[in-house]
Image: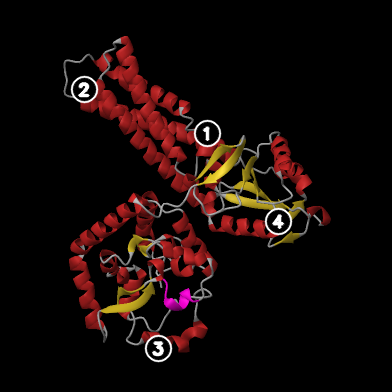
Amino acid sequence: MRSSESEAHGEGAGTHRGWRKAYVKSLMVADILCAVVAGLAAYLIRFGANAGTPVRTSLLPVLLLPLVWGAAMLVSRAYEQRYLWLGPEEFRRVFNAAAMLLAALGTISWAFKLELARGFVVVAVPLAALLTLLQRYGQRRLLHAGRRRGNFQQTMMIVGHRSAVAALREQIDREAHHGYRVVGCCLPDGHALDNAEAFDGIPVLGSLDDVAAMVREHQVDAVAVMPCPELDGPTLRRLGWDLEKTRAELLLAPAVTDVVGSRVSIRPVCGLPLLHMERPELTGVRRLTKELFDRSAAFAGILLLMPVLLGLAVAVKSTSRGPVLYKQERVGRDGRTFSMLKFRSMVVDADRMVGSLVAESEGNEVLFKMKADPRVTRVGKVLRRYSLDELPQLINVLRGEMSLVGPRPPLPTEVERYGFDMHRRFLVKPGLTGLWQVSGRSDLSWDDSVRIDVRYVENWSLTFDFMILWKTLGAVLRGSGAY
């Protein structure tokens, strides 16, 4: 049975793509309504107290603003589906529309010597942009929630070797809010297989020669091509030509993954468009800026949270025997060890009890974790649930041993089992929070932990840190993966 949510977004229109047009229409209507609200608010601010202004003249900008705002959004291509649903580009185009509209109105006013109500324009256009951004963000959140329930899906076919296909499928399953559903794959040796055969639950639809035909047969929305020696330049070019006759997008995965778009650009070299990967931003002014921000924020946090810290200290001390703070040796930047501070959430000598509990571990292949750990005190359960036991690490940040955001601080015993890739994390300081905090924490597998830590180091920026800090608040309140 099709859900009412799907029907409301047009999935009953005879195609699984029907929800897309309905979603774009809802954006257009909401954008116009935002402009109407912004126009009325600006009218009240600019003309509300001016009884001498003719009503017809003062209402004209209010009536024109929705039309002008809608036109600006169209010109900035804010309704193209490839810019919607994910990523910052949708919001960037709203900003572009507002800036373009302000510049156009100013230029027209100056060129034709028109008497525009500057006070109205200065209030109305930024307010329309703000309301538009908020409603688009809200609609995106609802869309992502629906996708996690299996609605608003886009079909995808993966092309490449088995290991690459399985890895991408696993990533797609982790990022359910992206809304992709894998309908099958085409393998270099797919012609030797029965089409009904599958591996890892992925149907094998055919060989590389069958991609276009399978796209048409299964109404595929996107074809993801993984790095594959059989798919050289001429073959990919012909595949692109074949897919032009369909509605499917062609997505090419680079050989280097887990690198954000800001570090990747296309540059002409000797007449060829080559993919250029910038160095990660780990040194210089940006690193100094991160240091200053970390220590300033930690100092301010300690001052503001002092009553909370004292209250938690009293709760820990009065409910169980032992010290208030727990010190544990961790490995920081450049492999140097330091004493990480936490509020004690377990009984004294809990470390010595690990051997008797290791058989009941619910963590990953390296880390010991238990959801119902008998060593945790009553107060400790609350502290760990909401990550309050981590607050003393603000002192580690203030001392320069940790950052507010970074990879998870590892134990020396973990470092002994690290492969080459994981030593990359020691280029930066460990963090009070990080991608691991907002991606599942204790529920992560070891491979996921490695991938997340390396991704952070490769893509570090202040903007990335602010995004993680914002998401940390939601992760802490939900308590997901905390035990």
The quadrant of the picture occupied by the C terminus is: bottom left
Which colour scheme appears in the figure? secondary structure
| Residue pictured at 56% horizontal, 40% vertical | 19
* Residue shown at the point (38%, 55%) measured from the top left: 468
- The tag earlier along the polypeptide, 1 or 3, is 1
Q: Using the numbered discs, state the Cα–Cα distance from disc 1 to disc 3 in whole angstroms.
A: 59 Å
Residue 199 sits in quarter: bottom right
- Crowding at mark 4 (Cα within 10 Å: few <14, some 14-19, many 20+): many
Circle 4 residue:
161
Measured Cα–Cα span from mark 4 to mark 2: 66 Å
Mark 4 vs mark 3: which is more N-terminal?
Answer: 4
Element on which disc 1 rests = loop
Quickly name the residue at label 3: 352
**Residue at the image point whose x is 46% and y is 39% from the top:** 89
Q: Is 127 colored magenta in this rendering?
A: no
Question: What number is the disc on residue 287?
Answer: none
Image coords of residue 57 (percent x, y)? 27, 14
Label 1 CA crowd tier, 10 Å (few <14, some 14–19, many 20+):
few
Report if the CB atoms under discs 4 and 3 are less than 8 Å apart: no
